[in-house]
Image (cartoon, rainbow, N blue to C red):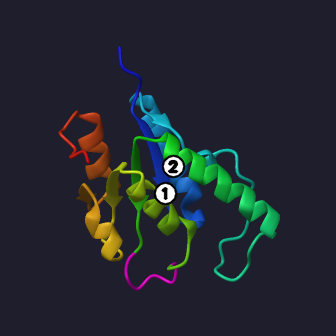
């Protein structure tokens, strides 16, 4: 018997509630969600100008890096090119996963050159969830 596939969900902090719903859907399908930032990390503002204290941010970064490395696949929830949310740890998480040769999936637009290296790109969450839950072949590294 194989263990459920381990997924890391990466997105901007302001989408945390949305990603918690997606994580619940995936968990119900037998996937293990490695993204502790969705459930354990303390909330802080995502208004583009306010940052949490450096100590807190460092702890969140360490936890997220460990979670990315423990996952088999990273799902990146990207933003439109005209979005004001260009900064963010989600880009670093992508780089960590790419360097570690994880399976990389994008949900949304190809936001920059590095996201073009994804194994699969889905326009919508529904399309991604369908591919993952109906055992469709999702390319692997």
- Report the side of 136 relative to 12 (left or right): left
**Is residue 77 in view?**
yes
Mark 1 or mark 2: whose residue is earlier in sequence: 1
Residue at the top extreme of this rendering? 1
79 left or right of 18? Answer: left
Query: What residue is drawn where x is 33% and y is 65%?
Result: 108
Q: Mainly helix, strand or loop, the magenta region? A: loop
Please provide percent x and percent y for residue 5. 39, 33
Q: Position of residue 74 (x, y in %)?
A: 41, 51
Label 1, on which residue? 10
Q: Which mark is residue 68?
A: 2
Residue at image point 64% right, 80% down:
48
Image point 26% across, 42% down: which residue? Answer: 130
Q: Is any part of residue 22 visible from this angle?
A: no
Q: Is residue 62 left or right of residue 138?
A: right
Image: magenta residue range: 80-85
**Res 112 quadrant in image:** bottom left
């Amino acid at each position: 018997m194989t263990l459920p596939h381990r997924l890391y969900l990466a997105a901007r902090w302001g989408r945390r509630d949305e990603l918690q719903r997606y994580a619940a859907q995936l968990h119900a399908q037998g996937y293990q969600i490695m993204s502790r930032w969705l459930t354990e990390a303390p909330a802080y503002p995502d208004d583009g100008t306010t940052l949490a204290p450096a100590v807190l941010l460092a702890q969140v970064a360490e936890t997220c890096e460990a979670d990315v490395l423990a996952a088999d696949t990273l799902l990146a929830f990207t933003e439109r090119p005209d979005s004001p949310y260009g900064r963010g740890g989600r880009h670093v998480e992508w780089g960590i996963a790419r360097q570690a040769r994880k399976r990389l999936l994008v949900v949304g637009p190809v936001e920059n050159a590095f996201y073009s290296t994804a194994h699969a790109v889905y326009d919508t969450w529904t399309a991604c969830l369908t591919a993952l839950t109906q055992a469709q072949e999702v390319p692997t590294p």
